[in-house]
Amino acid sequence: MEEKLNFTQLLQKPIAMMTGEELCFLITRSVESTEGTTPQVASKGNYYGIEGIARMFGCSVPTANRIKKSGIIDKAITQIGRKIVVDADLALSLAKESGGIHIKE
């Protein structure tokens, strides 16, 4: 598509009046502009189960089980029966403090 399309004019145009080409152009430009500005940030919040620990540390489930059993992140874990809830921020900071766990970034 030619660059003759004025981006600001297209933003003002109602979607119902756009051609498919114009709409695709706007979507492509929007995706391109957000890809460059979105930083890769580790997810925060709570993770659930051993699989959540594995996702948080970027490791396998058996390794996540060893991390949990090591006691390094015990302060970040709440467990009731079989339900495990992990505070990601606290777990990552505890792991960094201990130095025993190498975190993939």
Image: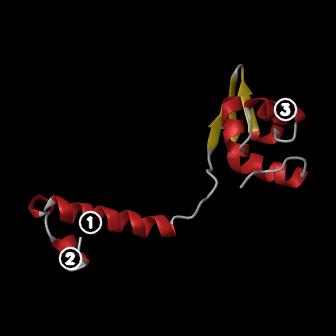
Residue visible at 11% across and 58% down?
Answer: 16
Label 1, label 2: how far apart the Cα atoms are: 9 Å
Viewer-proximal residue among 97 and 63: 63
* Tag of residue 66: 3
Please report contact status of discs 3 and 2: CB closer than 8 Å, yes or no.
no
Which amino acid, mark 2?
Leu
Label 1, label 3: how far apart the Cα atoms are: 49 Å
How crowded is the residue under tag 2: few (<14 C-alpha within 10 Å), some, or many (20+)? few
* Tag of residue 25: 1
Left or right: where does residue 88 sit relative to residue 14?
right
Examine the rendered structure and indicate whether residue 72 appears above or below residue 37: above
Q: Give the image location of residue 34, x and y in percent.
A: 43, 66
* Tag of residue 5: 2
Q: Earlier in the sequence, mark 1 or mark 3?
A: 1
Mark 2: which secondary structure? loop
Please report contact status of discs 1 and 2: CB closer than 8 Å, yes or no.
yes
Residue visible at 20% across and 76% down?
Answer: 5
Left or right: where does residue 45 sit relative to residue 54?
left
Mark 3: which secondary structure? helix
> Quadrant where the C terminus lies?
bottom right
Q: Which residue extends farthest front? A: 1
Q: Give the image location of residue 50, x and y in percent.
A: 71, 30
Q: Give the image location of residue 43, x and y in percent.
A: 61, 50
Left or right: where does residue 65 sit relative to residue 4?
right
Q: Of discs 3 and 2, which sits in the foreground?
A: 2
